[in-house]
Amino acid sequence: MHRQPTQLSDGEELQPQLAESACELRQIHGQQDEMVATRRQVVELARSLHAVRAEVQHDAGVLRQLRASRSWRLSKPIRFMMGLMRCPALLRQEWKRLHQFIGGHAGLARQREPDSIAIVGAPSPPPPLALPSDQALVEVELGLLRLTLPEAQAYTPDVYLWGVIDWHFRFQRPQHLARVLADRGYRVFYVSNEFIDRPYPGFTLEPLDQHGRLYQVHLYLAGRPPIYHDAPAPAQIAQLDAGLMQLASWHGASQTLSILQHPYWRNLARCAPDTRIVYDCLDHQAGFSDNSKSILVEEHNLLRSADLVVATSQWLKDQLGTANEHIALIRNAGEFEFFSRRPENVFADPAGRKVIGYYGAIDAWFDIALVRAVAQRFPDCLVLLIGRDGAGAAKALSDLPNVHWNNEVKYTELPFWLYGFDVCLLPFQVLPLTLATNPVKIYEYLSAGKPVVAVDLPEMAQFGDLIRTASTHAGFLDALAETLDGRDDASLPQRRQAFAAQQTWEHRVDELEAAAATILARLPRVSVIVVTYGNLQFTRNCLDSLHWYSNWANLEVIVVDNGSQDGTPEFLQSWRDGGESRQIILNADNRGFAAANNQGLAAATGEYLILLNNDTYVTRGWVRGLLTHLRTDESIGLIGPVTNNIGNEARIQIDYSDMEEMAEQSRVYTTLHRGRSFEIPTLAFFCVAMTRTTYEKIGPLDEAFGMGFFEDDDYCRRIKQADMRVVCAEDVFVHHHLSASFDQLKQEDRKLLFERNKAIYEAKWGAWEPHVYR
C-alpha cells in the first residue's frame, strides 16, 4: 500500500538549468542558428553553462528574466546532441572534448582489488558526485555533464532504487532503505515514479543528503503517465532506457544493485550497468483493482527473472510460493531513535479527552465502519485521524462530533501527534491487500511505547502481547475498552520499546545485505579458456585484465600453452599458484588453435564457456554483459563482443592511445548501447561465449584447421545449422591486438595456411564469403 496519486513534481517548478544557460547563451551571441557540430561551439556552450549558473545563484532577478524569455531554449543543442548520439564516432570525440573542458580527464589507473567483489557488505564510502552547481535541482540532458570515477572507486556498486512513490510524497520503506544504504557508503539513486514530461531522453538529479551519496532521479517521459496502471509501451521503454544510459554514463558506475519496488520497472532495470536485480515486493499486486493485466504479467516475469525476491510479510512470501527459488522475508521496521524520543510539544485535546489516534493512508482498505463504531462506543474520547483521505472518510464520519480528521502531515511532525495518542489504532479491512501488509506504523507506535489495538492480520502475530488484536468489530471495541481502562501491565511500554529497538531500518538493511550477498554465491560457473603461444607480455596483460575487470566471483580461468619458448610456461606456473580457480595445460609443442581450445573446453567445469585470445584486454562487466544476453535469449547459440580491431562487423570506430583511455571510451560506447545486439554471419574467435548445453550439442572445434584460420567460420556454420543464432553484443567491449600469434609466422606461411584451410572450409560448406565491416 505504497501508492500515491498522480501529482506535479516539485522539480518542475524550476526551469532546467541547461535551458536557462542556453537562453543566456543566445542573448550573448545572438546567432545560435549557426550552431553546428564543432568543438569550438561545444566549448562555448560549456563556458556559458558555468557563467550563467554563477549569475543565477546570486541574482534572482536574472533567474526570473530567463524564465520569462521567449527563447528557443535548447532546440539547437538538443538537435545537435541527438545528431551526435546517432553518430557514435562524433559523439565520442565531442563528448571527450567537452568533458576535458569541464572537469578534465580523471583517468582510470588500475588499482589492486580483491579477487571476489561483493555486491554489498561494508564497502569503503565512494566519493560524492561532483555536481555541476550548488543548485538544489540539477538537470542533466543528453549526457552533457558527466562524472568519471577513479578506478579505485569503480568496484563499489551503486544502488538504483526504483521507487513506487516520489521521495517527497510520504516517508516510508523506500526512503528508509535508501537513506540507510547511503549512510553505509553506497551511492544511491532513488528513481522517482514521477516523470518529467519531455519528448526526448534526459533526467534531473536532486541531492538528498549532505554527503553526495543520495539523489532522487526524475527521468523524462512524454506524457508522464502513472506507473501503477499499465506496463510501459516499447516507445516509452526506449525513451526511458536512453535517459537511464545517460545517467549511467554520467555517474560512471561499473556495477549496480537494482532494487525494484514495482513491476513497471522490470525491462528498464535490466539495462542498468552490470546489475543484480532484487524485487522488493511491497504489496499483493493483484489486490489493487486498478492494475491492468500487463502489470500482473510484468510482475510474473519479474518474479521469475529477479536474482532475489524480497517479501515484506510472511503471508506475501507464502503467496509467492515457488515463483522464485530465492525469496527472503525482510519485514518493515521503524526509525526507533526518531520515534522513541518524546518531543517537547505534543498534541493535546483542547477538551481534555483521551485520544484514540491513527495516522497513515486512508484509502480503500480503511475500515470506515469500524471507526464509526469506535466513535459511537467511546463518545467521551477524541477519535483523531491523520492522513490523506482517499476513501471519503472525512465526509462519511462528518456527523460524529468526536471524530476529527487532519490532513497528512510531514514525517518529521509525526511524533508531535503520536505522543498525544492514548491508544493507537490499525483499523483495516481484511482483504488480500491488507493480509499481505506489514504496517510500518506499528513499529513506530511501539517505538513510542504506545498501546495498540489492531485488526487481526497475519503480521500482527509477531508482536505477541505487545498489542491487542481482534478479528471482529465487537472484539475490536472490547480490546479498545480494556486498553482505555488501563488494564495493561506496567512493564509493557518498556517492553514495546525494547522490541522496536531491534526492528529498525538498520536491522533491515543488514538483512538485505546478507540476502543480496547470496546472489554472488549463486553465480553460475563461468570457464574462460585462453590459448597462448609466445607473446608473454600480451598474456600478462590479458590475465591481469581478467583478474581486475571480470567482477565474477565464480570464474574459472584455464590457460593452454602451445609450447611457448619465451618464458610463458614459467610465468603461467607462478600465475596458477597466485590465485584460486586457475588451471594451466602445458603442451610440449604447438598443437594449433582448435586443438588447444578443445583441451581447455574438455577441462572446463563451467555452465558457461568463453574462448578468449591472449592478445585481448577485457573491460569491466564483460562477463555479466555476455551472460545477460545468453540468459535472456535462448535462441542465441554463440555471442561475442564489439572490439577495436577485427575483420568484420564486430569492429567499431573507437580511438584511444592507452588502456586507461580505452576503458573510458569503451564505457561510453557500451553504456549508450546497453542491451543491444545484432546477428552477425561469423564471430571471430578472439572472444566468444556459449552455454555448456550449446557446446555439448555442437561439439568441439574442428582440429582439421590445424594452426588456425576458418575454425571460427566453421563453428558459426555449425551453430546456425542447429537453428541457433550467432550474435554480437553492442554493450560489451574487448580490446583486441589482432593476430598476435600469427604475426610470428612468415607472410608466405600465413598465406599458405589461409588457402589450405579455406579449401577445407569450402569442402564442407561451399564457397566462403569474405567478412565485411559495417
Image: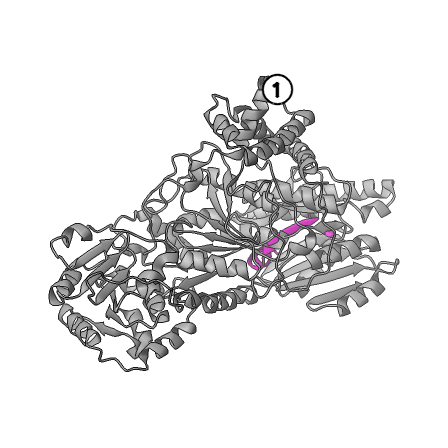
Position of the N terminus, as image quadrant, is bottom left
Above or below: residue 410 compared with residue 225: below
Is-magenta flag for residue 697? yes
Q: Is residue 532 left or right of residue 386?
A: right
At 59% from the left edge and 49% from the top edge, which residue is drawn? 638
Residue at disc 1, secondary structure = helix
Q: Is residue 258 visible?
A: yes
Residue 116 in the figure: left or right of residue 420: right
Reply yes or no: does residue 124 show up in magenta.
Answer: no
Left or right: 760, with 182 as reference point = right
- Which residue is nearer to you in this view: 656 or 62? 62
The residue pinned by badge 1 equals 29
Asked whether residue 634 appears in the rendered view, the answer is no
The x and y percentages for residue 599 are: 71, 61
- Depth order, front residue of 578/192: 192
Q: Could you tell me the amino acid type at mark 1?
A: His
Q: Mark 1: give few (<14), some (14-19) or many (20+) Cα within 10 Å.
A: few
Quadrant of residue 13 in the image? top left
Instruction: Give the number of marks.
Output: 1
| 434 and 603: which is toward the camera | 434
Up-down relation of residue 105 to residue 439 (above or below): above
- The quadrant in which the C terminus is found is top right
- In this rendering, the answer to whether 361 lies above or below 757 is below
Classify residue 104 by image quadrant. Answer: top right
Magenta residue span: 685-704
Is 687 displayed left or right of 293 in the figure?
Answer: right
- Residue at coordinates 42% horizontally, 65% vertically from top-left? 338
**x 81%, y 67%: residue:** 574
| Residue 435 x, y percent position in the rendering | 27, 64
Q: Position of residue 644 (x, y in %)?
A: 71, 40
* Residue sitting at x 33%, y 64%: 441
| Percent position of residue 298, x then y | 38, 50
